[in-house]
Image (cartoon, rainbow, N blue to C red):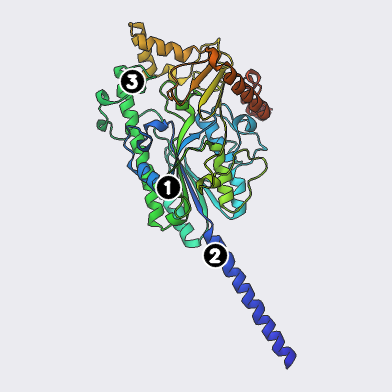
Amino acid sequence: MFSTLNSIRFLCLTLLLTLVVSCLSRSEAAEKPNFVFIIADDCTFRDIGCYGGQAKTPNIDKLATEGMRFTHCFQTAPMCSPTRHNIYTGQYPVQTGAYPNHTQTYRNIKNITHYLPELGYRVALSGKKHIGPQDLFQFEYSGKNNNPDEQVIDELFADSAKTKTPFCLFACSNEPHSPWNKGDASVYPPASVQLPPYIADTPVVRDLFSKYLAEVTYYDQQVGNILKLLKDHKLEDNTLVIVVSEQGNSFPFAKWTCYDSGLQSAMIVRWPSKVKSNSVSAAMVDYSDVTPTFVEAAGGVPAQGIQGKSLLPVLFQKTDQHKEFVYGVMTTKGIINGTDAYPIRSIRSRDYKLILNLNHEATFTNACTKSKEFQSMVAAAEAGDEQAKRLVDKYMHRPRLEYYDVQKDPMELTNLAGRKVYASEIKKLEEQLHAWMKSQGDEGMETELAANSHIQRKKKQRKK
């Protein structure tokens, strides 16, 4: 009798402990944060309202009041495909093989779809892909015309709210990528548009810049719609949201260049009760930091191969320092109308930017130099417009080395490379840049010429 009673008690205690552990496990699972990363396509960060821009972006501006706005966020390559591989792998472009545009990583490179599912997450991508090999990037894919599918996103949020399954969503817009044909351009009369000083003033440029600004506003509406879905499903309190602008627009001196207008990005992070509202961080961060941030926030440990650093200490305001330098890699091989081989590398500290044009004897070309806006600048130059002539020449013909004081000259208009007073600082930055290139296996021109060779070999194997 006594033995039977003890057995019953032991069984009850076991069941109770099992129930407690089960409840704790569910509680821990419920506490795992969701992640929503929203990215534009060819949007210069300076054009967004809360970054001082003239585009009307009320949703992004409001988000900035609810979280942290980064003033020194960068990407490593000023083109779509390398940027997206950089985000998802947490590694720099040459290291992964994805440094030209229209590219893919080496097959041994892991990405966020390997890391987060191990921590219990659904990982989805809705909108623009531009990544490969696609079988290595095992997202739940959706999208319409290279834009996020809000109906599918709604279903993802609804299902996750119901099942308490944490998710990571990358909502990848195609806006404001050209052609600029979305949004209401009448809000931005061409005559009233303020052009950046590195673009020549022509009627064509003004007209297209007006349309571009309208599409920035269109992107802002997409951001607002996705944030509303989060709210509708009561998910916003437990969701870390990041909104970024990607590389600069396709006007001259932005996309396809290593100037700040090509490499610097907006980044706004909201995480209720975790990230202080209406806060600003000047920490130097880059896109490789996204994946390790999500992994650590999910309760994991970033894998050894990840080169980025988790942003959590910055987000929690434990530090206002993150990286001393950020780097840039531009590869013309494989881009539309690109120079056969024109590798550009850059290094930026908080105060200075050094750019190396490793084949500066060649003429720099890309899709921009064939565009209507650039051709209108060429026509203006030929008609005697001195500003247009100077800017066209500066864009297509570069010196070996460019050096800018980005605090005093944020638009990088005055190259200080020839001034002896800066010789010592230039030498230090150039040595640091070469050391970083070596760490990445980047041999400059040789690396440029080998771009996408891992894809070509695969194509040859298929033919056999």
Query: How crowded is the residue under tag 2: few (<14 C-alpha within 10 Å), some, or many (20+)?
Result: few
Q: Residue 153 vs residue 22: left or right?
A: left
Mark 3 or mark 2, whichever is nearer to me: 2
The amino acid type, in three-letter code, at marker 3 is: Val
CA distance separating discs 3 and 2: 56 Å
**Between discs 2 and 1, the one toward the N terminus:** 2
Pinpoint residue 214: horizontal percent, then vertical percent: 32, 33
Q: Is the C-beta separation of discs 3 and 2 under 8 Å?
A: no
**Do tag 3 and tag 1 residues touch (Cβ < 8 Å)?**
no
The answer to which quarter of the image holds residue 147 is top left
278 vs 26, nearest the viewer: 278
Q: Residue at x 48, y 57 (%)?
A: 160
The answer to whether residue 453 is visible is no
| Dot in front, 3 or 1 | 1
Quarter of the figure with residue 234: bottom left
User: Can you identify the residue that label 3 sits on?
Assistant: 205
Q: Of the residues shown, which amino acid type is indicated by label 2?
A: Ser
Q: How far apart are the alpha carbons under marks 2 and 1?
A: 26 Å
**Circle 1: residue type:** Gly
Query: Which quarter of the rendered picture does the C terminus lie within?
Result: top right
Residue hosting label 1: 67
Residue annotated with mark 2: 27
Residue 244 in the figure: left or right of residue 53:
right
Q: Residue 205 at what x, y percent from top left?
A: 33, 20
User: At numbered mark 1, what does the secondary structure look like: helix, strand or loop?
Assistant: loop
Disc 3 element: helix
